[in-house]
Image: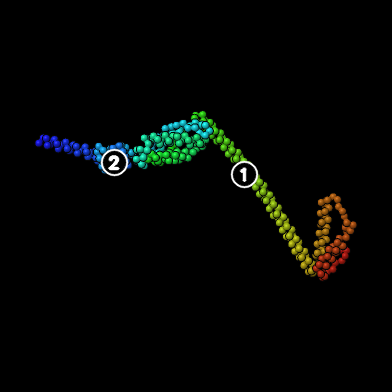
Amino acid sequence: MPTTLLSIVVVLIVVFFVLRATIRVVPQQRAWVVERLGRYHLTLQPGLNVIVPFIDRIAYRFDMRELPMEVPAQVCISLDNTTMTVDGVLYVQITDAVKAAYGSSNPFTAVVQLAQTSMRSEIGKLHLDAALSSRQLLNAAVAEAVDEAALNWGVKVLRYEIKDITPPAEIIRAMELQITADREKRAIIAKSEGQRQQQINTSEGQRQQEINVADGRKQAEVLRAEGEAQAIALVAEATAKAIATIGAAAREPGGIEALQMQLAKDYIEKWGNLAKASTNLVIPADLGNVGALVSTALAIVQKNTGPATNSVGGNNS
């Protein structure tokens, strides 16, 4: 009985180890490469798999997820013979486990080395300023070059990112001085442009002011001339009405006698005022013949108004 029990235990232990060597559970996003008697046999996919113990063995285990890899810093020389230190990060993913197992002894090391050589090659095509400002172009060029070569290794290069580009300290100081000079130059130009615009605005303002003043004067002169013309017209109209009124009054009975008396009175007043205003007078020879002057004026009135009802003598005084 004890012998039988021992045999059962031994059989169970053997079955356990056989099953353990036969059944393999592969995690998600993993790929295991199986060799049979030293040759590639199959690739185990995620889940439950069965292999033949002592004949098959798992030679390689690969993680199929995206893997970030540090690219060590290296010294690169630009087209203008300037040295700089460049490092980066490479994002890769194994897409073919068989090629990754047998295409290269160490695909990840190969990818990193190729990224470094590609970066040195791309930096050598550019001047320092272009290299510093063309990170996206450098990233794309390196990723494309490495991805093309890594296809034989079962590796897909997703992207490459430059972490830092460090020129020598002397170059950095020179660049800082250049940047400072450029900023000062832009400041001076901006200030001069502001002064120029200010002068232009001032001159335009003065010009517009002079134009406005001239237009105001012109309008004032026009208005003054129009006012004077209207005043003259009003005076002329008033004078015409006065003359018409005098002519109408002269046609009335006694109108000529009244007009005669008014003419004589105005004549005497005008000469009296003229004598007060000036010390030098030119006196007509017939100054005393006021009646003749009045008769002449009355003759003009009678000619314009028609025959009068009363007649006046030639030498009334």
* Residue 289 horizontal/vertical position (percent): 88, 60
Q: Residue furthest top?
A: 170
Residue type at tag 2: Val
Q: Which residue is mark 2?
A: 26
- Of the numbered discs 1 and 2, the one sitting upstream in the chain is 2
Left or right? Give the position of 285 relative to 231.
right
* Residue 190 horizontal/vertical position (percent): 58, 39
Packing grade of label 1 (10 A; few <14, some 14-19, many >=20) is few
Quadrant in which the C terminus is drawn: bottom right
Q: Which residue is mark 1?
A: 201
Q: Nearer the viewer, mark 1 or mark 2?
A: 2
Packing grade of label 2 (10 A; few <14, some 14-19, many >=20) is some
Question: Quarter-wise, where is residue 195 in the image?
Answer: top right
Indicate the secondary structure of the residue bearing disc 2: strand
Res 26 visible: yes
Rendered view: 132 above or below 255:
above
Q: Are marks 1 and 2 in contact (CB under 8 Å)?
A: no
Indicate the secondary structure of the residue bearing disc 1: helix
Res 164 visible: no
The residue lying at 86 percent from left, 52 percent from top is 281
Residue type at tag 1: Asn
* Residue 170 horizontal/vertical position (percent): 51, 29
Depth check: give the residue in front, 231 or 88. 88
The residue lying at 43 percent from left, 36 percent from top is 115
Rendered view: 242 above or below 203:
below
